[in-house]
Image (cartoon, rainbow, N blue to C red):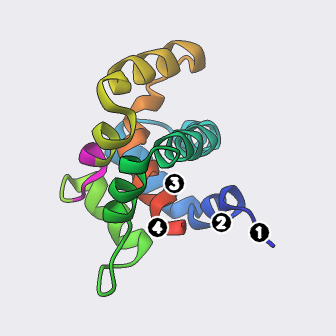
Amino acid sequence: MASIFEDLSGLLSSSVTKDLGKAVGLKPDLVTKGVAVLGPLVTSALANKASTPAGQTELMNLLPKDGDTSILGNLAKSVTGGGGGTDMLSSILGSSAGAVGATLDRALGFKASALLPVVMPLILGLI
């Protein structure tokens, strides 16, 4: 059985990676590296959120509903500002979202935090 991370990598074809890189101001190879780091980080944050009674309900409300657009459609909306990636970030990471982003950027040496609003809905869509 494929893991969420394998599914996530499979969604990001070279053209999607290139377009995403243009949208967030990163080279395609940095998008690939950033997603490889952010996938496990986001999944861990979701697990921590789900471990609380109120968190489970909040997560269920964030999941795509019947009739929602495809995962890649949600990705396009997130990049163009129409998606809820930023809302999801604050719901999942809370007030630490800025600190998480800054730490990632320092550790990786590029603005990986720009990918957080995109990776969050992708992971939720894969769930």
Which residue matches tag 3?
Answer: 17
Which residue matches tag 1?
Answer: 2
Instruction: Kindly identify the amino acid type of the residue bearing the numbered disc 4.
Output: Gly
Q: Is residue 120 above or below residue 97?
A: below
Residue at the image point whose x is 57% and y is 66% from the top: 11
As measured in the structure, the alpha-carbon distance from the residue carrying label 4 to the one carrying label 2 is 11 Å
Residue at the image point whose x is 51% and y is 22% from the top: 104
Q: Quadrant of the C terminus?
A: bottom right
Q: Which residues are magenta?
A: 83-87
Give whichever of discs 1 and 2 has the lower sequence position. 1
Disc 1 to disc 4: CB gap under 8 Å: no
Instruction: Kindly identify the amino acid type of the residue bearing the numbered disc 2.
Output: Asp
Instruction: Kindly identify the amino acid type of the residue bearing the numbered disc 3.
Output: Thr
Which SS class for mark 3? Answer: helix
Give whichever of discs 4 and 3 has the lower sequence position. 3
As measured in the structure, the alpha-carbon distance from the residue carrying label 4 to the one carrying label 3 is 18 Å
Which residue matches tag 4?
Answer: 125
Taking the image as shown, residue 4 lies to the left or right of residue 46, namely right
Disc 4 to disc 3: CB gap under 8 Å: no
- Furthest-right residue in this view: 1
Which residue matches tag 2?
Answer: 7
Disc 1 to disc 2: CB gap under 8 Å: yes
Magenta part mainly helix, strand or loop?
helix
As measured in the structure, the alpha-carbon distance from the residue carrying label 1 to the one carrying label 4 is 15 Å
Does the magenta segment cover residue 46?
Answer: no
Tell me if mark 1 has few (under 14), some (14-19) or many (20+) residues whose alpha carbon lies within 10 angstroms of its own: few
Tell me if mark 3 has few (under 14), some (14-19) or many (20+) residues whose alpha carbon lies within 10 angstroms of its own: many
